[in-house]
Amino acid sequence: MAGGIPNQDFLFRIFQKVDLDKSNAISADELQQALGNGSFTAFNPETIRLMIGMFDRNKKGTINFNEFGALWKYVCDWQETFRSFDKDNSGAIDRDELKQALTTFGSGEAAIRFDDFIQCCVVIQTLTNSFQHYDTNRNGWITINYEQFLTLAISLRQ
């Protein structure tokens, strides 16, 4: 369903499957259990935390159904992007594929898994959003003091 949000009934059925405790909210643990890496490994907990933080509009530490639709689309879109960079369909982006996809992003590993890829993209998007908050002239340049820098950096942990 990449590129668009599926119909509400389909999305609600998925939401109900992920909401294991039937609380009408998805916790980080439930989301981690639901998301697959394509390699039978659990999603990186930091990636899960970042995604919950990004879509948890009511700041309860969980994702309700209304927030889930945006998260679903986000993951599907990144999955499509990831697959386009994973030229050999190995389930991982190797160095050459990563270099080709993100020439400005470096990796100490020989490959990057899907969850780590999302984490990188979430961090970049969060930093970009924080940067744009200070870039009032929209010219790609900001001047900030140390306290503002810390506020910008701490925004990644929220």
Image (cartoon, rainbow, N blue to C red):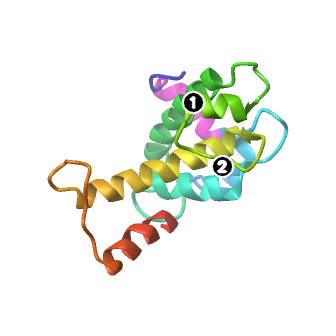
Left or right: 18, with 61 as reference point: right
Does the magenta stretch mainly form a helix, a strand or a loop?
helix
Q: Is residue 14 highlighted in magenta?
A: yes
Rendering coords of residue 82 (x, y %): 62, 29
Looking at the rendered image, the quarter that the N terminus falls into is: top right
Residue assigned mark 2: 31
Q: Is 69 colored magenta in this rendering?
A: no
> Residue 19, position in %: x, y?
65, 48
Name which residue type carries label 2.
Answer: Leu
Magenta range is 6-16
Task: Give the number of the disc on residue 8.
Answer: none
Disc 1 to disc 2, C-alpha distance: 27 Å
Identify the residue shown where x is 85% and y is 38%. 40
Q: Secondary structure at mark 2?
A: helix
**Residue 76 image offset from top left, x and y in percent:** 56, 30
- Return the residue nearer the eye: 15 or 22: 15
Residue at left 57%, top 30%? 101
Residue type (three-letter) at the residue carrying disc 1 = Ala
* Side (left or right) of 29 relative to 118: right
For residue 101, the mark is: 1
The image quadrant of residue 148 is bottom left
State whether residue 106 is above or below residue 81. Answer: below
Query: Residue 96 versus residue 77: which sits nearer the camera?
Result: 96
Residue 59, percent from left and from top = 44, 64
Q: How many marks?
A: 2
As helix, strand or loop, the secondary structure at mark 1 comes to helix
